């Protein structure tokens, strides 16, 4: 048990880390309510005007819709493939099993720019033009990892005797999966899907190399910051992206906390 001074120092250090991580986000959120279009300190006044301006921007709405659509489809693909890979690695013994596991996990370990450049090179070599579906493929490659890790961790904690008992009672493989395995792993599966969507929604590096003429919300933010003429709208959109990302991550954390994964 740490002493009182040690506990105080650890708590202070944790607080400083949190301030370092979230202070810039808090500043951007504050500037989203700035009444002026000039980012100065102190803020001269507070207003909701930029929220209406941002929402009336057709380009922002289109980018938001594209990001949501790509994120949902990529998450669906990740759930299907990640779950299947987790079951294969956990339930079967075959040559190259560890290599399969390493290959599935590898995209999340690589820098996003490497993954994006590799995907771009593959699409060019295959003669596939960059489009909405290349964005989905790019996002799914690293979203699979989140689902795979969550489901695999849950499967390793589940006693095999439950499925065996179900089979002994006359249930076939599909019935056992539907009535025994799926309910036990449902929270891990949902948490993995939520995290995968949050990861897809705010991924900008991979999107840059796989979007072509498509303009997702992170790419719009990047372009607007570079031009520097629409910073108030950027602050509003960044606040929205942060909220859309933070809420799923919080839900996934609570689900994983309840399930013990």
Image (cartoon, rainbow, N blue to C red):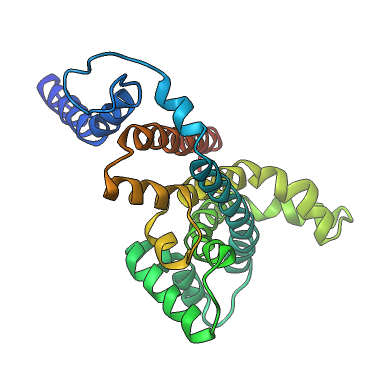
Count of picture labels: 0
**Does residue 147 sit above or below 137 in this rendering?**
above
Quarter of the image for the N terminus: give it.
Answer: top left
- The residue at 49%/42% (across/down) is 60
Q: Is residue 160 left or right of residue 256?
A: right
The residue furthest left is: 5
Residue that protrudes farthest toward the top in the picture: 45
**Snapshot quadrant of residue 111:** bottom left
Q: Position of residue 21 (x, y in %)?
A: 25, 36
Please report the residue visible at 23 percent of the width from the left and 28 percent of the height from the top: 38
Residue positioned most to the right: 170
Which corner quadrant of the image does residue 177 belong to? bottom right
Q: Is residue 137 left or right of residue 120?
A: right
Determine whether 189 is above or below 3 in the image.
Answer: below
Residue in the picture at 42% in, 36% down: 237
Q: Is 139 placed above or below 257 here?
A: below
Residue 235 position in % (x across, y down)? 34, 33
Q: Where residue 181 sits: x, y (%)?
A: 71, 50
Q: In the visual, does 160 lie left or right of 217?
A: right
Query: Can you give x and y, in whole percent of width and height, for residue 5 in the image?
Result: 10, 21
Query: What residue sits 33% from the left and 38% below the top?
Result: 230
Horizontal relation, residue 188 to residue 232: left or right: right
Asked whether 186 or 56 is in front, the reply is: 56
């Amino acid at each position: 048990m740490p002493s009182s001074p040690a506990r105080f120092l650890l708590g202070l250090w944790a607080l400083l880390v949190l301030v370092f991580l979230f202070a810039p986000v808090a500043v951007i959120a504050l500037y989203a309510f700035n009444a002026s279009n000039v980012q100065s300190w102190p803020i001269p006044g507070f207003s909701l005007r930029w929220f209406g301006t941002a929402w009336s921007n057709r380009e922002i709405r289109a980018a938001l819709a594209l990001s949501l659509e790509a994120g949902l489809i990529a998450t669906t693909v990740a759930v299907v493939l990640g779950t299947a890979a987790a079951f294969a690695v956990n339930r079967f013994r075959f040559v190259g099993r560890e290599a399969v596991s390493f290959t599935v996990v590898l995209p999340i370990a690589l820098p996003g720019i490497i993954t994006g450049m590799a995907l771009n090179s593959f699409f060019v070599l295959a003669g596939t033009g960059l489009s909405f579906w290349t964005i989905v493929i790019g996002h799914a490659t690293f979203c699979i990892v989140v689902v795979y890790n969550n489901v695999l961790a849950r499967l390793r904690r589940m006693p095999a005797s439950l499925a065996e008992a179900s089979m002994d009672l006359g249930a076939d493989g599909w019935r056992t999966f539907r009535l025994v395995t799926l309910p036990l792993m449902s929270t891990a599966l949902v948490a993995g899907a939520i995290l995968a969507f949050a990861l897809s929604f705010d991924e900008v590096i991979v999107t840059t190399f796989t979007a072509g003429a498509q303009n997702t919300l992170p790419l719009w933010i990047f372009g607007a910051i570079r031009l520097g003429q629409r910073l108030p709208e950027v602050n509003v959109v960044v606040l929205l992206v942060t909220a859309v990302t933070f809420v799923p991550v919080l839900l996934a954390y609570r689900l994983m906390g309840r399930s013990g994964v």
